[in-house]
Amino acid sequence: MVTLLLDSTRLEVVLSGTERLLSFRKGNVAIERDAIAKVQLTDDAWTWLRGVPTPGSHVRGILAMGTWKSAGGTDFVVIRRHRAGVVIDLEDHPEFDRIVLTTRHGLALVEALRLDVADEAADVAEIAAEARAARKPKRPRAAPVPAPGV
């Protein structure tokens, strides 16, 4: 599973060694925050796949990784099985028009993109968790009530 790092200026899709190999990519995918036009959550990332892998890997229903080109644009995809994911539409990105990823941190990404974050990159799941903890009021614990006697 990809790791999503976010700082005040960009989102970085960090790929493992296997993901780099299967996507025919030497490095991570960096996206300026200003280039992110829209982020959508999806129950099945396969429904967003368009075009053909150029270069990339594809095993129907199991994985799709790499650059996918179609008449609609150029996408970078990392899709595993039929899992929930995120679709990131981009504007003025030099390489891609859209990023499609399977990740269980899609909601955390959406929450983190709404926040002003630090200059140092951090995992989007951690950013969202910290924001939720900061919003949640701390209530004092109630004193235990003794059980009634029989």
Image (tube, helix red, strand yellow):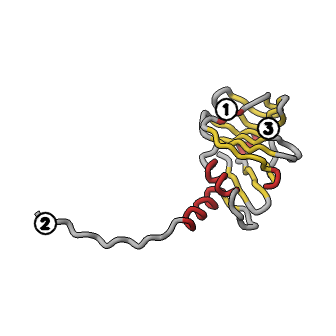
**Cα distance in 3D space between marks 3 and 2:** 67 Å
Location of residue 8 with respect to 93 vertically, above or below: below
| Residue 144 in which image quadrant | bottom left
Secondary structure beneath label 3: strand
Which residue is painted at 71% across and 64% down in the image?
116
Residue 72 rendering spot, x and y as whole percentages: 83, 32
Determine the residue positioned at 60% across, 46% down. 104
Callout 3 crowding tier (Cα within 10 Å): few <14, some 14–19, many ≥20: many
Determine whether, in the image, residue 123 is placed left or right of residue 150: right
Which mark identifies residue 75? 3
Label 1 – label 3 distance at C-alpha: 13 Å
Percent position (x, y) of residue 76? 78, 40
Q: Quadrant of the C terminus?
A: bottom left
Instruction: Give me the disc on residue 149.
Output: 2
Q: Is residue 118 above or below residue 103?
A: below
Kindly state the secondary structure of the residue where label 2 is placed.
loop
Residue nearer the viewer, 37 or 119: 37
Which of the two discs, 3 and 2, sits closer to the camera? 2
Q: Residue at x 52, y 65 (%)?
A: 136
Residue 131, image quadrant: bottom right
Is residue 113 positioned above or below 97 on the image?
A: below
In the picture, the disc for residue 46 is 1
Q: Identity of the amino acid at label 3?
A: Asp
Please provide percent x and percent y for residue 112. 67, 57
Q: Quadrant of the N terminus?
A: top right
Could you tell me residue 106's position as x and y percent? 63, 48
Q: Secondary structure at mark 1?
A: helix
Whichever of callouts 3 and 2 sits on the residue coming sooner in the sequence is: 3
Q: Which one is in front in this view, the residue at disc 1 or the one at disc 2?
A: 2
The disc labelled 2 sits on which kind of residue? Answer: Gly
Instruction: Work out how far the residue at label 1 is from the one at label 2, CA to CA, in angstroms.
Output: 59 Å
Q: Nearer the viewer, residue 77 or 25?
A: 77
